[in-house]
Image (cartoon, helix red, strand yellow):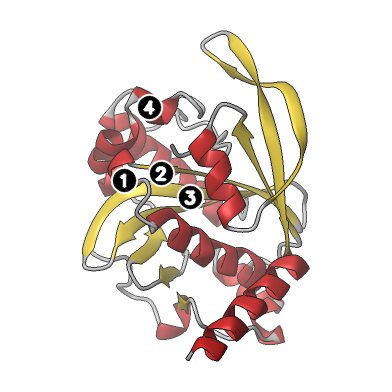
Amino acid sequence: MMSGGLRTNLATPSASADGTEGMNMEDRLELDRPLTDALLDEGARKNWRRHLPVLDGVRVRLREIEPSDATSLFTMLASEEITRFISPPPPTVEGFAGFAIWAESGRSAGSHACFAITLQGCDTAIGIIQVRPLDRNFETAEWGFALGSAFWGTGVFQEAAELVLEFVFHTLGVHRLEARAAVQNGRGNGALLKVGAVQEGVLRKSFLRNGRSSDQVLYAILCDEWLESRAARKGALHRVH
């Protein structure tokens, strides 16, 4: 597994704690936080450019990627089983540190958000989720992800994805979130379907890897459909209890 069209250039050149130091509690985004218009005001949208919020789930915690994550990410994401469906990652630990610096710069410019996936009680990065705009207003965006193979099939990705979707639709105000996954990437395609992505088509020979091109599946999640699905899931949960 597990990539959902992670196409950002991980090889961009360049050269902690739990990521909450110096943050107010308002900067932490809980999974059950209610949707209000206040979350979509201009101030909330701009605040993430100063620093990404910490996103807390039951098992998973997402925080901004840091240069200190380089060693763990290199260990987790450099194997062929991970990289065969994504753009080539940095070939060295230093390269991953440079990518983290590049991601921070993109966040400050409002052009990129990159979360490190960690587990509650353990701050080691085991994967990443990236979001980038496809238009000037961040109304249409694209996301990609990669997770260490030791955590495939554990539910970690699904929980992390739900947290990011909450952030994307609540804080960024995205209306349409796209993803691409190689046709051969069964796990990546399955993961996207599990979090509510809808297949919209096949992009022929759109992914180039090692001089060979292959087809990708185009997926999208719409904000209004996601909100309806989220409300239905919560309603079902209340009925069970």
Kindly tell me whether residue 91 is visible in this rendering.
yes
- Residue 93, placed above or below residue 239: above
| Residue 150 spot, x, y in % from top left | 27, 43
Q: CA distance from mark 3 to mark 4?
A: 18 Å
Secondary structure found at label 2: helix
Residue 191 as seen in the image, left or right of residue 115: right
Near mark 3 (Cα within 10 A), the count class, few <14, some 14-19 or many ≥20, is many
Secondary structure found at label 4: helix
The residue wearing badge 4 is 81
Q: CA distance from mark 3 to mark 2?
A: 15 Å
The quarter of the displayed image where residue 92 is located: top left
Q: CA distance from mark 1 to mark 2?
A: 6 Å
| Residue 227 spot, x, y in % from top left | 69, 73
- Quadrant for the N terminus in the image: top left
The residue wearing badge 1 is 67
| Residue 86 spot, x, y in % from top left | 50, 29
What amino acid type is highlighted by mark number 4? Answer: Glu
Residue 101, numbered circle = 2
* Residue appearing at x 56%, y 89% in the figure: 239
The residue wearing badge 3 is 129
What amino acid type is highlighted by mark number 3? Answer: Ile
Near mark 2 (Cα within 10 A), the count class, few <14, some 14-19 or many ≥20, is some
| Residue 104 spot, x, y in % from top left | 46, 50
* Residue appearing at x 36%, y 23% in the figure: 80
Mark closer to the observer (4, 1): 4
Q: Nearer the viewer, residue 75 or 187?
A: 187
What amino acid type is highlighted by mark number 2? Answer: Ile
